[in-house]
Amino acid sequence: MSITATLDGVAVTTQANVYFDGKCISHNVQFADGVKKSVGVILPASLTFNTGAPEKMEGVAGSCRVRLKGEREWKTYGAGETFAVPPDSSFDIEVTDAYHYICHYG
């Protein structure tokens, strides 16, 4: 899979979303057709995220280990790889170096 390097024709929310005491920072982007995504970075940490909508996480740089809710095994994802999280669920993520991502909602 190729890595998304730019997002053209979007509106960017300039105030950052800051989670987990600054361990995850993202910005919301919206396309002209109404599609919303977020672009961010997770700094070294072990975190648990909850989801409302389904999410597809696209790695842009770095790597992470992920365990989806209900699973026992961890899987590793790097740049150019994606993982999907169902709606109303959660996932654990471990990052040892900065993990840059695009989160695709829906």
Image (cartoon, rainbow, N blue to C red):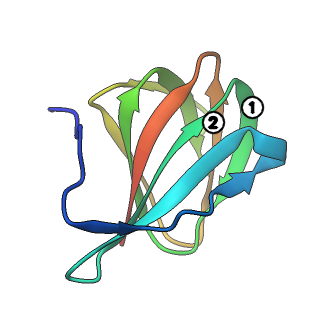
- Residue carrying label 1: 46
Q: Residue furthest top?
A: 96
Q: Residue furthest right?
A: 21
Q: Nearer the viewer, residue 95 or 13?
A: 13
Q: Quadrant of the N terminus?
A: top left
Residue 49, given in percent of the width and then of the height, sits at: 67, 53
Tag 2, which secondary structure? strand
- Residue carrying label 2: 93
Q: Residue at x 39, y 48 (%)?
A: 102
Left or right: where 44 falls relative to 52: right
Residue 101 shows in the view: yes
Are there few (<14), some (14-19), or many (20+) residues within 10 Å of tag 2?
Answer: many
As shown in the figure, which amino acid type bears the numbered disc 2?
Answer: Ile
Q: Residue at x 72, y 47 (%)?
A: 48
First in sequence: mark 1 vs mark 2: 1
Determine the image quadrant of residue 8: bottom left
Vertical arrangement, residue 55 with respect to residue 64, above or below: below
Q: Residue at x 62, y 63 (%)?
A: 15
Q: Quadrant of the C terminus?
A: bottom left
Residue 70, given in percent of the width and then of the height, sits at: 62, 50
Q: Nearer the viewer, residue 38 or 59?
A: 38
As shown in the figure, which amino acid type bears the numbered disc 1?
Answer: Ser
Left or right: where 3 falls relative to 56: left
Q: Mark 2 and mark 1 in contact (Cβ < 8 Å)? A: yes
Tag 1, which secondary structure? strand
